[in-house]
């Protein structure tokens, strides 16, 4: 089930175009922007059908927010406006091939500072910036369509390029393990270039920056390239996808029969009582809550990421809460 | 030969050093098998799970040098979770127990721990050479054990490993009596080193031929080190960060001039261009130049440097050199054998630094070129056809067009014809990596013409199972096949199960292979380890009855004589 609890301002600023909401009926794609690791399995086969439904969807959002440059997300669905929403919570997924579940929950609940709250002010995502880091750790079922999606994305992207739309090159969609360059090389280049950003003439992007991501209770850790994201929501979304299998153990294996495994109850639990908080270790070895600092500073200081359970993060929360109280709220746009 | 006593035959065998030749010798007859195995000193094991240490030692009890490879190649690109496997500990334990006179250990893509390094350092009194490539799991403490305990250490060669740098004093752990070093490569370490200890170590190592420093060694220390070791042949200058004051720079220039044996140069991680000219005096001797980490040096300075390097055989460079720079390489470096052009901008921001023109220029200008790795934004069939005509001697041809599925940018056609021309012309091609828009047709060409092909990397290519079938049926010498994001499924996987007996391994990720297909394969081929790397909860796979539709995310299969491995993590399911 998918439901929206949010205000319009967050949509404008915070939701990068690449994130999509999903619903069980497959009517539209939803993006998940939440601090908890809600499973978010991508369903590319819905993409084509979504194009038809687009016209009939209810939308909550600014009419001009149709953002055409967002097609290049590999493995994600067709372009969507940031403002696509459903006004109503939908029925639990019954027929949905990959069992994708998304919750879009931008309102801080209780004492827990929502992840989305923190990047309101710092979000560098403007309408013209394409999402960068859609990590391709998708379920296998999903990736069976990857090639078609990729082709589609590439074609769309090329047509956009021809039509003269400007893209921030750093935000181009990334595929895991592509281009085939060793992490060692990527990291070394990143360390080198980050020290000399001012003298680089016109080079749009810095080298990749891999950091390890661990999660309490997960059997193994992963690595993400921070440079493939340009904002916290993207990172959050990608991490959710990556670690979804751990939070929702019954999650559809290869997407095929996943829906049968999902239980409504589990999702609700996760949504409401989500205990997962994203933290990082900075250069000084301190563990901080992700989202406190502007994205650019975060990428420079982050050394490791960790998805902690709520209880572990309690020590971090108060400081964060203080900071968040001091932050200005950006006013709603009409 | 049967009339000669064993000792004579053994003596003859001593001249045969190549692994493959020795393997062939051992198949001739029982007597040769026996003689060969007792005299075998070096063994190469391409997949550490294909055999176990006990059986290895059983056959080759006099082993002195062992090379092991662990994780599959795509682990380099983050496609294999960290805990997948490839642990060296059981090997070192077994070797230690057997009291083998091990002298050399070379590991690639394996998990090495400080415990392993400590055990290694204490178990083999004659240990001489440690080469670790793309390994992980250890810290500088492990290096300290090696330094302290290996009395006759000759080579400590760390290439692109992930090492936890405790910023300790591992370099000072080399005892004063250690004077035997020939190779010292710690370029991949991130932390500061004890410069005094390093200088003293270099000063007392008259045989030191290869020294590769990490980024934390400042320029003046580099100059002093070069003064201590003018005999150096292979130098990694570390960060080469400057600007030094004029006095230090003069000292550096003077030191460089004295290194008349210098043939290989690398490093330059932070280098700023104007200090490159310090190396100009010795450039004419260089046979190998690696500037592929020098992000700060732009085309014109690279060109100035390369113009002096007339004897260059190997060049690793960034695409910031541009097509113009490659044209200079083509006209200057007539001895060039291997070229690698890496992308500066990994995000593909449209910086078309090198194009098909650069590749064509190189192929036209460098007749001895046999290995190429080329990252670019665009390619055409016409260019590839020209390259094939110019350079029929390719052994390794790896082309990576950064954007997946990109067609010929002029004709919008797939690149089938271009790659087809390459495999047709290059009769000795052993390794091929494909990219760009490709249909089944390219695989038909590969199956038809690439008779010597041993390793093939496929990504985002092909249309149907036929593509993979062409390759499996045609390439008789295929050893390693790795495929990602291509529409090949069970039909291709199961068509010829015995084929996998002739191959080292097959990797398929994000393809159309199903769990049912993999299970059938595992049943038909008990001598294969069929591993499914499953990001999700493993147990779920069993309960589901719809295996035929359940796509497998990552499949890795390899032949083995020792059955299922016991160290697989829970997310790896071995059928």
Image (cartoon, rainbow, N blue to C red):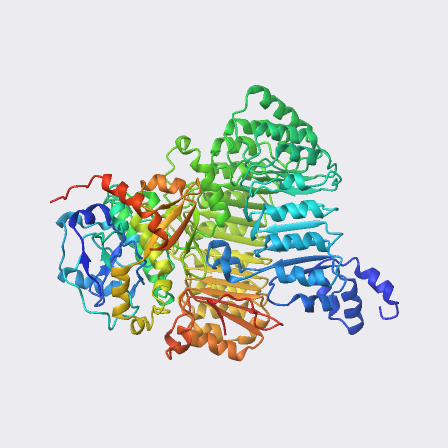
Depth check, front residue: B257 or B569: B569
Residue A288 position (above or below residue A138): above
Residue B353 position (above or below residue B418): above
Please state the horizontal and vertical placement of residue B285, each as a whole percent of the image: 66, 34
Residue B395 in which image quadrant: bottom right
Residue B108 position (above or below residue B495): above
Residue B547 in which image quadrant: bottom left
Locate the N terminus of chain B by quadrant. Answer: bottom right
Residue A307 in which image quadrant: bottom left
Please state the horizontal and vertical placement of residue B149, each as a whole percent of the image: 71, 48
* Residue at the far top in the pictured view: B247
Drawn side of residue A331 relative to residue A317, left or right: left
Please state the horizontal and vertical placement of residue B439, each as a whole percent of the image: 41, 63
Residue placed at 48% from the left, 72% from the top?
Answer: B493
Depth check, front residue: A249 or B325: A249
Q: Is residue A222 visible?
A: yes
């Amino acid at each position: 089930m998918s439901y929206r609890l949010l205000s319009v301002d967050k949509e404008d600023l915070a939701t990068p175009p690449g994130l999509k909401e999903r619903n069980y009926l497959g009517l539209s794609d939803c993006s998940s922007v939440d601090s908890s690791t809600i499973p978010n399995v991508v369903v590319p086969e819905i993409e084509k059908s979504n194009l038809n439904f687009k016209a009939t969807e209810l939308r909550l959002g600014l009419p001009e927010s149709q953002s055409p440059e967002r097609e290049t997300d590999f493995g994600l669905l067709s372009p969507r406006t940031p403002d696509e929403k459903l006004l109503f919570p939908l029925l639990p997924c019954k027929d949905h091939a990959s069992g994708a579940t998304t919750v879009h929950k931008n309102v801080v609940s209780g004492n827990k500072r929502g992840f989305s709250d923190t990047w309101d002010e710092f979000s560098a995502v403007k309408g013209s910036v394409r999402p960068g880091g859609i990590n391709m750790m998708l379920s296998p079922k999903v990736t069976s369509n990857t090639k078609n999606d990729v082709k589609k994305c590439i074609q769309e992207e090329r047509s956009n390029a021809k039509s003269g739309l400007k893209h921030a090159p750093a935000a181009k969609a990334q595929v895991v393990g592509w281009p085939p360059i060793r992490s060692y090389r990527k990291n070394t280049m990143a360390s080198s270039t980050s020290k000399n950003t001012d003298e680089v003439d016109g080079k749009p992007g810095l080298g990749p920056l891999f950091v390890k991501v661990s999660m309490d209770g997960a059997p193994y850790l992963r690595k993400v390239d921070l440079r493939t994201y340009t904002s916290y929501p993207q990172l959050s979304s990608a991490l959710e996808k990556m670690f979804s299998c751990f939070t929702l153990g019954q999650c559809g294996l290869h997407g095929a029969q996943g829906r049968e495994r999902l239980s409504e109850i589990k999702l609700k639990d996760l949504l409401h009582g989500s205990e997962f908080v994203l933290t990082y270790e900075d250069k000084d070895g301190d563990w901080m809550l992700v989202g406190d600092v502007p994205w650019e500073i975060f990428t420079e200081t982050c050394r490791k990421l960790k998805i902690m359970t709520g209880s572990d993060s309690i020590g971090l929360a108060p400081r964060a809460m203080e900071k968040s109280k001091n932050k200005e709220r950006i006013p709603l746009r009409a | 030969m049967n009339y000669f006593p064993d000792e004579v035959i053994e003596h003859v065998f001593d001249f045969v050093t190549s692994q493959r030749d020795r393997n062939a010798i051992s198949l001739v007859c029982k007597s040769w098998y026996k003689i060969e195995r007792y005299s075998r000193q070096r063994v190469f094991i391409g997949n550490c799970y294909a055999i176990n240490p006990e059986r290895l030692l059983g056959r080759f009890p006099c082993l002195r040098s062992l090379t092991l490879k662990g994780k599959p190649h795509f682990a380099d690109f983050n496609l294999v979770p960290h805990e997948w496997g490839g642990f060296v500990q059981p090997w070192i334990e077994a070797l230690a127990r057997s009291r083998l006179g091990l002298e050399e250990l070379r590991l690639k893509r394996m998990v090495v721990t400080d415990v392993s390094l400590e055990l290694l350092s204490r178990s083999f009194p004659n240990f001489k050479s440690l080469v670790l490539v793309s390994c992980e799991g250890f810290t500088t403490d492990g290096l300290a054990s090696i330094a302290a305990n290996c009395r006759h250490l000759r080579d400590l060669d760390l290439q692109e490993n992930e090492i936890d740098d405790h910023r300790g004093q591992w370099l000072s752990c080399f005892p004063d009596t250690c004077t035997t070093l020939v190779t010292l490569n710690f370029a991949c370490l991130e932390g500061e080193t004890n410069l005094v200890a390093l200088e003293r170590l270099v000063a007392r190592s008259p045989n030191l031929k290869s020294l590769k420093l990490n980024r934390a060694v400042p320029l003046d220390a580099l100059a002093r080190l070069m003064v201590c070791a003018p005999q150096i042949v292979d130098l990694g200058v570390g960060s080469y960060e400057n600007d030094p004051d004029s006095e230090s720079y003069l000292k550096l220039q003077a030191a460089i001039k004295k290194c008349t044996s210098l043939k290989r140069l690398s490093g330059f991680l932070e280098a700023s261009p104007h200090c490159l000219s310090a190396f100009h005096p010795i450039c004419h001797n260089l046979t190998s130049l690696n500037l592929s980490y020098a992000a700060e040096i732009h085309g014109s300075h690279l060109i100035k440097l390369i113009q002096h390097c007339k004897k260059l055989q190997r060049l690793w460079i960034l695409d910031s050199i541009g097509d113009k720079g490659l044209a200079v390489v083509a006209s200057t470096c007539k001895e060039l054998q291997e070229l690698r052009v890496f992308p500066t901008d990994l995000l593909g921001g449209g910086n078309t630094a090198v194009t098909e023109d650069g590749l064509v220029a190189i192929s036209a200008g460098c007749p001895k070129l046999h290995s190429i790795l080329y990252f670019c934004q665009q390619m055409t069939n016409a260019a590839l056809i020209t390259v094939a005509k110019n350079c029929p001697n390719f052994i390794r041809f790896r082309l990576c067009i950064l954007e997946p599925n990109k067609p010929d940018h002029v004709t919008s056609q797939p690149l089938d014809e271009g790659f087809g021309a390459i495999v047709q012309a290059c009769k000795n091609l052993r390794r091929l990596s494909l990219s760009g828009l490709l249909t089944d047709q390219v695989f038909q060409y590969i199956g038809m013409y690439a008779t010597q092909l041993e390793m093939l990397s496929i990504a985002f290519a092909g249309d149907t199972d036929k593509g993979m079938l062409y390759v499996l049926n045609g390439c008789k010498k295929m050893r390693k096949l790795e495929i990602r994001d291509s529409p090949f499924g069970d039909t291709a996987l199961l068509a010829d199960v015995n084929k996998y007996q002739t191959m080292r391994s097959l990797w398929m990720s994000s393809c159309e292979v199903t769990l049912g297909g993999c299970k059938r394969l595992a049943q038909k081929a008990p001598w294969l380890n069929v591993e499914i790397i499953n990001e999700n909860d493993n147990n779920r796979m069993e309960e589901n009855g719809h295996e035929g539709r359940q796509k497998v995310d990552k499949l890795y299969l390899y032949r083995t004589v020792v059955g299922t491995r016991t160290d697989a993590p829970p997310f790896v399911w071995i059928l």
